[in-house]
Amino acid sequence: MRAPAPQFLYPALRARPVRRILIVKLRAIGDVLLSTVVLRSVRAAFPDAEIDYLTEAPARDIVEGHPALTRTLIFDPRHDSFLSLLRQIYRARYDLVFDLFCNPRSAQITFATRAPVRVGYPFRGRAYAYTVHVPVRSDRVHNTEFNLDALAVLQIPITDRALSFAITPDADRWAAGLLAPYRAEGKMLVALNPSGTWESKRWGLDHYAGLGDALAARYNAVPVIVWGPGEHDDALRVASLMQAPALVPPKTTLKQLGALLARCDGMVSNDTSPMHLGAAVGIPVLGVHGPTNPHLQGPFNALSAWVRNEKLECLACNYTECPIGNMCMTELSVDTVLAAFDSMLERARHIRAGGGAAL
């Protein structure tokens, strides 16, 4: 028997039953991953409600099949009519809507539901869409806390602060088969993610090759060089620059990539969506940061850590192109990143042995 729903202090949640809930998060895969921190708490608060999640096609695999969700709704602006989407969600008669994206389009979507409780962040020109405004702390707290603020404003108990990702049995079998020969040889497996959407966030292919060789020498590791659309040549280049053998996986779905990362012993990544995926599947992830702030966007699990070139004063500038030579990346040495990886693994072992606290 399910536990009874909590007695909410927020008046609008006491006024009528909450039978249907919609969570809206469009666009970026990494942003959708970071929003999964709310799912278990929403399900715990509303154990009998239908909970739908609306996102766009590239992020389908991030939330599809999640045990907290009833269904995943996909909007593809290349093919789908926006007016048809608005009619669809209006007819669904949602009781509670969370807009965790809050751009002009998601605000329109949220407003169109006409749900009695519509929660969102009142960025410029969007406050009209929401009946409940969430205090904006995106410049002060990690993105996961930014998402959890949407629950806190309704006084919904936060039962879980972990990211989550549903790995399918087929994807897990695929990953197990791919990695079986290396496990049979007793190899450690470390995922390396050398690519990224911003040029300024890329540590450099030669750096990743040097790190791969250092990991092979120190840990008897096989670097698993992961890649996404348009990044295959980068992965092959890193492997070609290495002296030690590396694994460049074939093209993967996000479900397969998540399963692959879950079977690795650790990861080093630029600040991109695979970094957050590694954190979501529970492995130690070392984020390599420069123009972005790891306190706000770093890998989010208790086993993970981040590294950056602390000699510079211009860190966390958020420039997509650096006007002064991208020194935060070009001058961050392999030795510095390797030392940070060593420290992270030692700390992760300590936590797993019962000597540390969860997030």
Image (cartoon, rainbow, N blue to C red):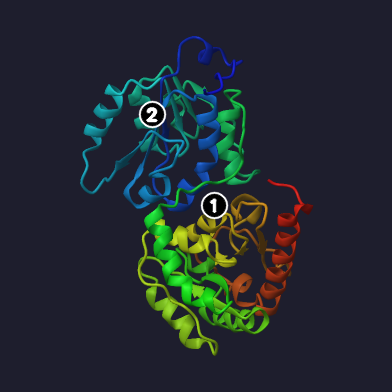
Looking at the rendering, which quadrant does residue 17 occupy?
Answer: top left
> Percent from the top left, x then y, of residue 37?
55, 41
Q: Which mark is residue 280?
A: 1
**Dot 2 amino acid type:** Thr
- Residue 354 higher or lower than 1, as above or below: below
**Dot 1 amino acid type:** Ala
- Measure the alpha-carbon separation of dots 1 and 2: 27 Å
**Residue for point 53% across, 76% down:** 184
Residue placed furthest toward the bottom: 243
> Percent from the top left, x then y, of residue 316?
62, 58
* Viewer-proximal residue among 29 and 45: 45
**Residue for point 31% across, 42% down:** 74
Q: Which mark is residue 260?
A: none
Helix, strand or loop status at disc 2: helix
* Viewer-proximal residue among 23 and 181: 181
- Residue 302 higher or lower than 181, as above or below: above
Q: Is 347 displayed left or right of 231 in the figure?
A: right
**Which tag, 1 or 2, sits closer to the chain's start?**
2
**Residue for point 40% across, 66% down:** 228
Which dot, 1 or 2, sits closer to the camera?
1
Q: Which mark is residue 110?
A: 2
User: In this view of the protein, can residue 56 be seen by the observer?
Assistant: yes
Q: Residues within 10 Å of mark 1 (few under 14, many from 20)?
A: many
- Residue 159 higher or lower than 167, as above or below: above
Q: Given contact means CB atoms under 8 Å apart, are the residues at marks 1 and 2 in contact?
A: no
**Residue for point 43% across, 61% down:** 257
> Percent from the top left, x then y, of residue 178?
42, 71
Q: Residues within 10 Å of mark 2 (few under 14, many from 20)?
A: many
